[in-house]
Amino acid sequence: MQKDRILVVDPCILAIESSCDDTSAAIWRNGKLLCNVVASQLMHDKTGGIVPEVASRAHQQVIIPVVKRALEQAEIRPQELDAVAVTHGPGLMGSLVVGVAFAKTYAAGLDIPVIKVHHMEAHVLAHFATEKKPQFPFLCLTVSGGHTQLLVVRGPFSYEEIGRTIDDAAGEAFDKSGKLLGLPYPAGPHIDQLAKEGSPKFEFSKQNIEGFDFSYSGLKTSILYFLQKEVRKNPDFIQENLADLAASIQHAIVESLLLKVEAALTETGLKQLALAGGVSANSGLRLEADKLAKRLGVELFTTPIKLATDNAGMIAAAASFAYREGRFAQDDLAPAARLTMRV
Ligand SMILES: Nc1ncnc2c1ncn2[C@@H]1O[C@H](COP(=O)(O)OP(=O)(O)OP(=O)(O)O)[C@@H](O)[C@H]1O
Ligand SMILES: [Mg+2]
């Protein structure tokens, strides 16, 4: 049983993120991030994707050093902490278990509460760990490795999901297309870099889906068939056109995302647009979203790249809202690989 807690005004929170292949710890105090340490697992590029058990073991190996480094960087002693926040889902079960077990044990040792954080809520609330914060309500396009969502964000724990992918996420579209080009996993950042040197001269099939939903499986198939056809004629086609192919793939994904964003902004009348999730690091998406926002007279919010991809800073920002409301986890907190967002 959780005991009644006296809430402090400016809590000092240790936040942990381990839902996928990044082990991260952050410290939050006085309404801001003191540090945000991220240890990324680099071995997955060899397998072309994440092997869950390998990810879980790697979290086990680095979680204590990562937390120690965060405490050192923030110059905080464990006794000064008021809560430990942790991602409890969604994500890979073996990865989540490491973070949740660590957080519960660490908090129990210090006799402080645990705050459970939904990974996708944290991607959205990462904006509150930055200087320039949106005001509720705002429209958020969350684009990551496992999700593509258009959300009307009414409050820290109040969302309306007005659009979602019906198949692959935008991050998967980047990663799977990049794999076809022979790029290492995750291919998103490589496509971003290559696209800067190329032009979007190749056309792939466009998403054709009603409303605010997204679909990327058609794009992937269209790229596959196009490459097969061209490589049959010229075996060096991919190498000779790598930058233009990357630019064309990026253009297709960004265009399809922003088409729905524009429709959603027009229909909802919202005047603030936030980009969240790993794919929001994409420079082409940022550039085009900026143009769209200016054209529509909407304010655009992006985070520094480190707060866009998986990191514990966003978990800390989300936890700061939960702490204020005294939303603490029960002692039997368990991770959940699948978890819907509270609405
Ligand atoms: N600059 C970039 N351009 C395009 N894609 C990028 C860029 N940087 C990262 N990504 C993509 O972002 C994804 C990772 O994002 P994130 O870490 O938020 O996802 P995840 O945590 O694996 O998934 P989820 O948040 O849905 O559980 C990968 O698909 C990666 O390719
Ligand atoms: Mg993520």
Image (tube, grey):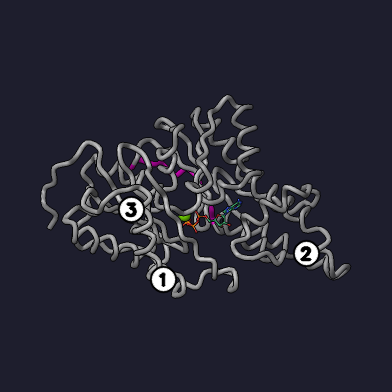
Q: Amino acid at mark 3?
A: Leu
- SS type, badge 1: helix
Between 77 and 262, which is closer to the camera in this rendering? 77
Task: Say few, some or many: other residues with alpha carbon within 10 Å of mark 2 (under 14 / 14 to 19 / 20 or more).
Answer: some
The amino acid beneath tag 1 is Ser
Task: From the top left corner, tell me how far across and down residue 126 is, in percent.
Answer: 43, 43
- In this rendering, position of residue 125 left or right of residue 267: left
Q: Which portion, as a residue range, is magenta?
A: 157-166
Which residue, given by chain and number where applicable, does mark 1 sit on?
56
Q: Is residue 342 visible?
A: no
Q: Nearer the viewer, residue 210 or 96?
A: 96
The response on whether ligand 1 sits within 8 Å of label 1 is no
Q: Which residue is at 34% across, 63% downward?
A: 99
- Closer to the chain start, of discs 3 and 1, is 1
**Residue underneath mark 2:** 227
Mark 1 / mark 2, whichever is N-terminal: 1
The image quadrant where one finds the N terminus is bottom left
The kind of secondary structure element at disc 3 is helix
